Amino acid sequence: MKNIYPNIYTFNKKILKKTANYLKLGNIAGIPTETVYGLAGNAYSKKAVQKIFHLKNRPKKNPLIIHYNSITSLKKDVILNKNFFKLYKKYCPGPLTFVLKKNNKSKVVSLASAGLNTIAVRFPDHKIIKSLLKIINFPLAMPSANLSSGLSPVSASDVYEEFKRKLKIIIDGGNSKVGIESTVIDLTKKPKILRPGIISSMEIKKYLRVSFSKKNKTIRSPGMMKKHYSPGIPIILGRNTKNLNHAQITFGKNNKNNKNNFNLSKKGDLKEAAANLYKIMRKIKKKGFKKIFISKIPNKGPGIAINDRIKRASK
Ligand code: TXA
Ligand code: MG
């Protein structure tokens, strides 16, 4: 198949092996997950982790999520607890990240977790990252594959747009199904959600008591930084525009068919809306609109995560 991008590869055994070797040598590759695409590097290699921070232009104090494919490999780096197992059984692999205590044998390089004594870990649910993790003997540090504070990529070409030829390998895994980043939950003490996601606090409450961290200054989360997930143009929340030169993002049934109208989900499905959010924002920016108006989105379930992202994007 003809491919206009020199570094985007269709998934097959050959590219899988090539990527595994490439990562072993401390290099970085763009890899699909079910949430968003990630910038993957060997979490046990200082060189690789440094490269990730450098490529993203990411502040050193912002820790990365480490991706695993089995409890056996996870145990080497963190201390597991009851709450972890409860949620693991229910949601893993899937779009949920656990903050756990690092154990003293852990080989995860200190910079990856920003020098903290905790590590954020996740079991991603996408065929490609799963096959990759199976054939390497180290976990993958993997932030979203975008420049710091920008929009997360949900397709291989989005990753290309962010890094162009600075990446030698981007594997094409189609559009990310979830479309927004994983829910992050701190399990080192009383369970607390640090970043909302498609798995909402309402869901998690079925299995354990959990609170929501709005402002916790002691937790260093870039997802909690004010400006984040930004398309780089002004966003006005909870309002509609009549100006056809401005983009209008809507949700649910409406009769607007104007060229500036982008609907997150005509049937009013919040999961579908989350899956479309970054894709639509990127499209709007590419089309050259200078401003985005977003109408009100219900603040429940996945809507909480959507509102969190657009609020930060609007700062
Ligand atoms: O869905 C996802 O989580 C994607 C895919 C690629 O897996 N990754 C992702 O990574 O969104 P990133 O780097 O964009 O966001 C990582 C989030 C940040 O909010 C960070 O602060 C938090 O995880 N985090 C990482 N380690 C932490 C730790 N030890 N304590 C508290 N928060 C942590
Ligand atoms: Mg990110």
Image (cartoon, helix red, strand yellow):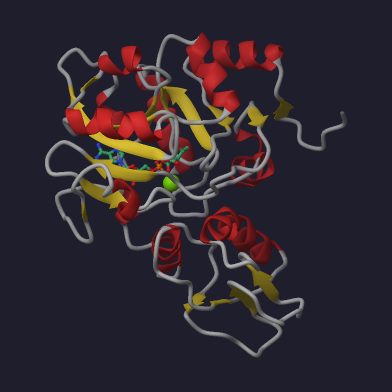
Outermost residue on the left side: it is 189
**Quadrant hosting residue 33:** top right
**Residue 59 seen by the camera:** no
In this rendering, the answer to whether 126 lies above or below 164 is above
- Screen quadrant of the N terminus: top right
Q: Position of residue 72 (x, y in %)?
A: 32, 12
> In this figure, what is the number of numbered marks?
0
Which of 310 and 251 lies nearest the eye of the viewer? 251
Task: Please name whichever residue, 236 or 162, is drawn nearer the observer in this view of the structure.
Answer: 236
Front residue of this view, candidates 96 and 287: 96
| Nearer-the-camera pick, 70 or 56 | 70
Camera sees residue 187: yes
Q: Tell me the residue at 46%/24% (across/down).
A: 41
Q: Is residue 108 left or right of residue 253?
A: left
* Residue 213: percent from left, percent from top: 21, 56
Taking the image in four quarters, ligand 1 sits in the one at: top left
Q: Which percent across, then down, holds residue 7?
A: 70, 30
Compared with 189, 201 (above or below) is below
Residue 273 found in image quarter: bottom right
**Residue 87: percent from left, percent from top:** 30, 35
Tell me which residue sits at (56%, 13%) in the image.
Answer: 20
Q: Is residue 112 above or below residue 43?
A: below
In the image: residue 111, left or right of residue 253: left
Q: Residue at x 57, y 32 (%)?
A: 30
Q: Residue furthest bottom?
A: 242
Quadrant housing the C terminus: bottom left
Please indicate whether residue 185 sits to the left or right of residue 209 in the image: right
